[in-house]
Image (tube, rainbow, N blue to C red):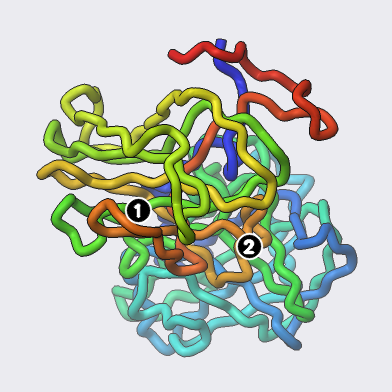
Amino acid sequence: MNQGFFWPWGRVPNWSSNTTTALDATGEYIAFIGRIAIDGQATNKTIDTTGSSAIAFAVAANPVFDDATSVFTVGFQGIDNTTGFPVRPDGNWAARSVVTTAVNTTPTLTTTSDYHVAVPTLGTSTFSHGDTVCIVLEMTTRGVAATSAVSVVSGNYLSTVQPAAVTNISGSVANVSSALPCVQITFSDGTLGMIDGTIFCAQGGANANLTWTDGSAVDEQGLMFTFPAAWTIDAIGFPIRLVDGTSDFQVDFVSTPTASQASLISGPLTQDAQNFGLAGVEGIYLLPIVPVTVAAGTNYGVVVKASGAGNIRFARAVLPAAASRSLFLPNGTNTLSITRNGGSGDYTAGSTSILNPCFVRVSNVPAGGGSAGMLFRAQGVIN
């Protein structure tokens, strides 16, 4: 039986779609609740109206906030431990941003499907790594304009007990099925935080999924990353969507992608889309390879080249800034998207905040740098 773990992701990422919650009536909210992870596992970090304090959240469908009498509030509340299941905020605000016009957030809530940054205007909150937090986004007052609404994005993942996303729509508190929090916290001193077990993912507009063909200006997409030790890799993979049986593609696993790159699997390996059973939706592609031992600190890349007439599509995550990589990703500052065109030459590292969901499967982690270690599967068996 094949065993192991995925790297650089702790589990196979699925960014193909998100859940959106339309807040278009007074008092409606979505609340994100879970344990906070603070960069560096820091303690006693404060978010208030000073310094770099901010809460970043994601929206969708060009949210409209064009009525001057509307009030939208983003911030922290306590947890109601008396009303009952499901978990919910207690209604008592601490640090929060009271948005009274479109200009109170960046970008504005009138024009973009993107992440937005709300700077607190009232209150203060202090947290340590591992504390339970409750972040609430509420249409506190909906103005008279029929179009005043904010559609908040939560990540579409496997359901979890905690972290949790809950809504109060029309006076009823309910879980958001198969969704996780999608927020980033910046404390006053610039330290970043998130709700543990989640990843910030913007969607829509310039952050839409990557779709390309062999004839595109860039016909090869991938992810470059490093390893903390000499591990053995026995598979590579990624979530991908094929349009039909013409969506052929090539796959490779390379070392030093941006400097004298070299294939580690005698690639690129051509994949005929007619041999696949799923099209029109994202699906996980996993390619077993002859086991390869990688070195610590060296850059490696999983790359995909469109080679057929039909298009292929990658989901992707867009982080608020390059600094977010250190918070959301293992070896995050070394994790970059890479591109190439024409199938020759070195790859170019792309935007530091856009990430393609490529990964490898680790089958053996040597103990103490030796050849023996934690073996996840029988060596020499390729399925």
Observer-nearest of 154 and 2: 2
Q: Residue at x 51, y 80 (%)?
A: 71
Residue at position x 60%, y 14% in the image: 379
Q: Is residue 85 above or below residue 180?
A: above
Residue 160: quarter of image: top right
Residue toward you, 2 or 288: 288
Q: Which mark is residue 221?
A: 1
In the visual, does 107 lie left or right of 42? left
Query: Secondary structure beneath disc 2?
Result: helix
Q: Secondary structure at mark 1?
A: strand
Q: Is residue 121 above or below residue 350?
A: below
The quadrant of the image that shows the C terminus is top left
Identify the residue under disc 2.
333
Q: Bin the neighbour count of mark 1 within 10 Å (Cα to Cα): few under 14, some 14-19, many 20 and up.
A: many
Q: Residues within 10 Å of mark 2 (few under 14, many from 20)?
A: some
Query: In the image as oriented, which residue stretches furthest toward the front?
Result: 260
Quadrant location of the N terminus in the rendered image: top right
At which x and y percent is residue 319?
52, 64
Query: 339 or 116, which is in the foreground?
Result: 339
Closer to the camera in the image, 248 or 64: 248
Q: Quadrant of residue 14?
A: top left
Q: Residue at position x 48%, y 60% from top?
A: 259
- In the displayed structure, 16 sits above or below 336; it is above
